[in-house]
Amino acid sequence: MKIGKLNSIVIALFFKLLVACSIGLVEKTNVALESSFKDLKNKILKIKKEATEKGVLFTAFTGLKTGSKVTSGGLALREAKVQAIDETGKFLKIIEKEALKLKETGNSGQFLAMFDLMLEVVESLEDVGIMGLKARVLEESKNNPINTTERLLAAKAQIENQLEVVKEKQNIENGGEKKNNKSKKKK
């Protein structure tokens, strides 16, 4: 009888230890993500402030028009977008790292919370003129709910790919000269 009771106690203690370790991992993940999220939002605000000081008028943006055709400070605006994209990339790497830690023990609520953070970050990019990304990511997630590591990482990759397209459009590597690639038709 004593051996059975001892086994029950050992199993109960083991279970409590397992739960405590799991909660500790989740708490560390939450702290890391929240800290990185706040840092990124502050950096985006700083990037916007610096671009404003260089002459970018963010108030001139319209619903879909967020380029140098609707505001002054073309090069500064493009640089601000690239800086914001680079900082967002760092945050997305942290999301990936933390998601992989939770791959075996995480639940759908945790992955959804990480996805919500990514959506908030994408939304904050609108402050520097990167528009429409949140809607595209949400549309994709309707068909594939974010409830596993794999789906979260797929959404992350989608965001990265779309940000890369925006970054390439900024044409910063070519000395900031934005060239009009549209050829004029001859009559």
Image (tube, rainbow, N blue to C red):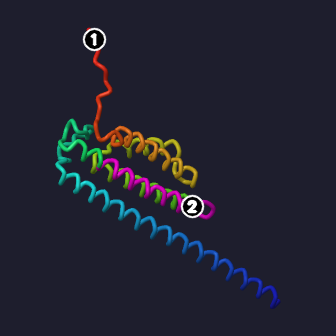
Out of 75 and 65, give the one closest to the viewer.
Answer: 75
Of the pair 33 and 167, the residue shown nearer to us: 167
Query: In the rendered structure, which amino acid carries the disc numbered 1?
Result: Lys
Determine which of the numbered discs, if any, sits on residue 122 in the image.
none
Kindly indicate the quadrant of the structure image that contains residue 46: bottom left
Which residue is at a point 45% across and 70% down the rendered structure image? Answer: 31
Is residue 184 inside the magenta stretch? no
On the picture, is 156 further left or further right than 37?
Answer: right
Disc 1: which residue: 186
Query: Residue 164 at what x, y percent from top left?
Result: 42, 43
**Residue closest to the eye, 78 or 148:** 78
- Say if the magenta span includes residue 87: yes
* Tag shown at residue 107: 2
- Classify mark 1: helix, strand or loop: loop
Residue that appears at 33% across and 60% down = 41
Q: Quadrant of residue 105?
A: bottom right
In the rendered structure, which segment of residues is drawn in magenta?
A: 80-106
Mark toward the start of the polypeptide (1 vs 2): 2
